[in-house]
Image (cartoon, helix red, strand yellow):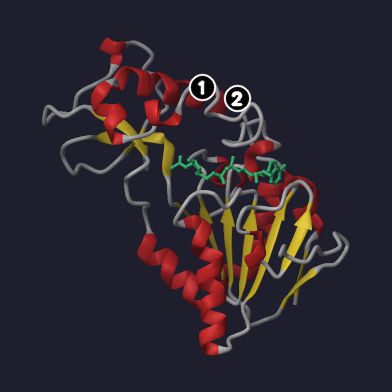
Amino acid sequence: MSSPHARIDEKVHIGPKELVMVLTGAGISAESGIPTFRDENGLWQGFRFEEVASIQAWHKHPHLVWMFYSMRRDAALQCGPNSGHFALVELERKLGDRFFLCTQNVDDLHEQAGSKRLVHMHGELFKSRCDRCSKPPFEDKRLYETADSIPNCQCGGRIRPHIVWFGESPFYMNRILTELDRCSLFICIGTSGAVQPAASFVRWARQRKIESLAPVRTIYIGPDEPENGWYFDHFYQGKAGEVLPELFRVE
Ligand code: OAD
């Protein structure tokens, strides 16, 4: 069974006491020119993801891993936020601390648009960190395209991308679970619902609804129904940059 389609001209009303959690995926940056992962011409094309996005890959060929993330840095540096990102900034402006944004994206387009209350659960493309010691991640826009260009930390460890790879734990899970637990509206945008744990967030929100009878609404926005589409109350079919700017009515 799939989620009911909502008419694009049907506004989503947000009441004065509502708490909103937004989860974004690669789809929100698609109109900015950053390819998604699983669509045709997706990011993994040309690279098998296990070759470049796992700790095993890092230990086996760090140079190939950095080539891939350097390519992504270079591509993302050419892109700017689109009207979908700006619509979320406007929503945050109206809701203040009743708004929380969790993105699976590692690009910085939400920040560039002006989003403040956000976390990057899969890391940040323009940050790096040591693969050995616990020094905090640092801003880094450099490209490491040759084997001997990968820098070392003072401790002797190697500098790696600040990205959550397959087999690693996403960041900010405590904060995310708290927000998921208190939101009354869960909005999911541009994610295929194929990668855990983010794919389960909507189910956890609904579970809460079943257990407490709290009125949690769940909506999805994107051109294709996601794999977890069944769990959404409404599916607004269309591109984020076209649907989001007109979607919300905040009371
Ligand atoms: P996917 O590539 O799996 O899904 C992208 C989704 O965006 C698809 O469902 C598309 O239909 C949708 N889409 C495409 N264009 C859109 C548009 N203009 N507006 C709205 N939606 C659009 O990407 P994610 O679900 O984000 O993890 O992938 C999840 C994770 O898989 C990523 O964060 C990444 C990857 O492994 C890590 O890097 C750890």
In the image, 208 versus 111, the foreground residue is 208
Element marked by disc 1:
helix
Instruction: Name the side, left or right, on which 98 lies relative to 49.
Output: right
CB under 8 Å between discs 1 and 2: yes
x, y percent for residue 158: 21, 27
Mark 2 = which residue? Answer: 78
Mark number, residue 251: none
Mark 1 = which residue? Answer: 74
Q: Residue furthest left?
A: 155
Instruction: Name the side, left or right, on which 43 lies relative to 135.
Output: right
**Residue sitting at 71 percent across and 53 percent down?**
225
In the image, 199 versus 12, the foreground residue is 199
x, y percent for residue 19: 58, 75
Instruction: Name the side, left or right, on which 251 lies relative to 144.
Output: right
Q: How many residues crowd around disc 2 within 10 Å: few (fewer than 14), some, or many (20 or more)?
A: few
What kind of residue is marked 1? Asp
**Residue sitting at 48 percent across and 21 percent down?**
71
Taking the image as four quarters, which one is ligand 1 found in?
A: top right
Q: CA distance from mark 1 to mark 2?
A: 7 Å
- The count of marks equals 2
Element marked by disc 2:
loop
In the image, 33 versus 81, the foreground residue is 33
**Residue sitting at 73 percent across and 48 percent down?**
224
What kind of residue is marked 2? Gln
On screen, residue 165 above or below 234? above
Visible residue check, residue 2: yes
Q: Residue furthest front?
A: 1
